[in-house]
Amino acid sequence: MSFYSTLVRYRDFDFQDFFARVTEERVDRALSAEILSPDDFLVLLSPLAAASLERMAQKAHELTVQYFGRTIQLYIPLYISNFCANECVYCGFHRGNTIRRKKLSMAEIEAEAKTIAATGMRHLLLLTGEAPAVTPIDYLEEAVRLLKTYFASVSIEIFPMAEQDYRRLKEAGVDGLTLYQEAYDESRYALVHKAGPKADHRWRLDAPERGARAGFRVINIGPLLGLGEVRSEVFLSGLHARYLEDTFLQTEISLSLPRMNPAEGDYQPDFFADDRTFVQFLTALRCFLPRAGLNISTRERAVFRDNLIRLGATRFSAGSCTGVGGYGEEKADAGSPQFEITDERSVAEVVEAIRAAGYQPVYKDWDMI
Amino acid sequence: MDDKLIIGGHAFTSRLFTGTGKFAARNWIPKMLAASGSEMITVALRRIDQAGTPENILEFIPKDVVLLPNTSGARTAEEAVRIARIAKAAGCGRFIKIEVITDMKYLMPDNAETLKATEILAKEDFIVLPYVLPDLPLAKKLEDAGAAAVMPLGAPIGSNRGLETKPLIALLIENCRVPVVVDAGIGRPSQAAEAMEMGADAVLVNTAIATAEDPALMGRAFALAVAAGRLGYLAKLAGQSVTARASSPLTGFLE
């Protein structure tokens, strides 16, 4: 079994035709359902449902307060290498890019860890490019063991791995796996992942399942908004999350909606979700998946992020740097960043904004046990 | 009237237990405790930071309130046991609420793992309060294993649905020697009163208080409801009937 069989069922599905048939009554029915079916979810993602955005927001807010309280969990990313064997047309780490490549030594990782820990952050997300020859499992394992002495929770956002490698990292102390499918639509996926191991759509798609079997506590998935038609991509990521929830009862499933901004970078995405549509996606996901964590990264603007606190978000990154070795003092030596961050506030400033919204910033919600 | 609840040798005047999760700000916790008079509060060990983050949750709990650390996050008996030992070593006292959850979708407790953890921890000088689905044979096994109370759920955690498991909890109340504390699912004061009226020894309420607009006021509301329900139980409720009782019975002529 794999989520792939679900994906195949929707390969020829006519989303535009479905949306064209949505009526106001149908939106009402989807909004009043206690447990939403996939069709209800798709109705809430339709252009017509945008007219009911305020009602969707109210429902999403209510559900989020019920299941998560007024709290926002904090995490911070740490890039330890930007070497990459892939050619993803939208990514700063593309192997053809002449950027400053860097891989941190254990001593450098420790220096970064100390700087980050001093901000009060206790949940860390460890990232690399996809270059197993440069950052082999032994290196990653050593890095995780080191970081676990500084942080309560270490999650990974690296390349897809085999189950036995995930097991090794879990043993080393990793409790969460973040892996974005980027594009669920296979033809769109092939267009932007030109070469390298990442070109294998199916290997990536099945990775969260391998991670769940390896015993990670939290699995975080998502589409990269901009690569494929956004409504269907969000729909498929929601179905993916529900498939994982249903298949792996022991695993917490969460989602992110990283969004490309056409105003930044050299790559011009073919698709775009504006702020209003983004909020529709976020609130529709909350209605469909009441217990799923919803992450918002510093890709989004500070003001926009602050407003999402009351619209279903449960986790924020803060004080982020997407360069390699960017937290230390010698910023000039840092490896080039993967993408430009937009919310450049410090951890303390983000914490203050969360408090100002009437929410509790949560630094620590996990211990390795 | 002396109506203290005794658990693990501790005497509680308030029969409302509370929790520390989901508050908009941690400084609501002491205000809520003061307003509700709750004498025991549960806290997830995974939220306690011994490394010293800006806000240590334990600093918000007055010293005279009994800590009930819980094993939230545990997937197995072994993990629950490890968390309990860490909690005790961290100075959180002898009480432990065993919470073993293997279903992240509905957050149902795993009764089998909970029993195993109870068997181990009760032998280690813990005062063990297991959180379970209401199941009478299991509750008796928990008693035999040394549980200091049993904590059946009224409805799924955070659901605010009330006493959906009422008939099953009634069996526990009727048959258990140890106190029965209804934990999880109670969404409003009237539901807490209902649990107490039927003879529950205490209730534990977190979500409904923590997510209220005014958690201190809601804490007070629950305290009053719990006290009223308890008095109703002690005063022996009049029996109920679904049909009317005729004041001129049909068989009156036989008297």
Image (cartoon, rainbow, N blue to C red):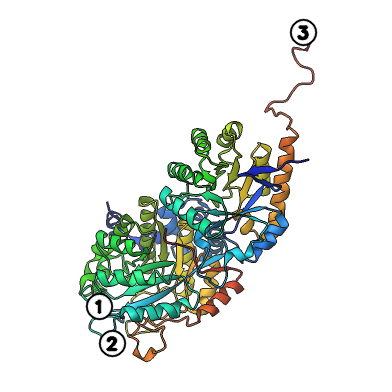
Task: Classify A356 as above or below A53.
Answer: below
On the same chain: label 2 and label 1? yes
Determine if residue B55 is in view.
yes
Identity of the residue drawn at 78% across and 40% down: B1
Q: Is residue B216 left or right of residue A266?
A: right
Residue flagged by tag 3: what amino acid is it? Leu
The CA distance from mark 2 to mark 3 is: 104 Å
Q: Position of residue B238 (x, y in %)?
A: 74, 30
Do labels 2 and 1 touch, CB within 8 Å?
A: no
Other residues around mark 3 within 10 Å, as few (<14) / some (14–19) / many (≥20): few
Q: Position of residue B40 (x, y in %)?
A: 64, 52
Task: Classify A114 as above or below A14.
Answer: below
* Residue bearing mark 1: A84
* Chain under callout 1: A
The CA distance from mark 2 to mark 1 is: 11 Å
* Residue bearing mark 2: A99
* Residue bearing mark 3: B254
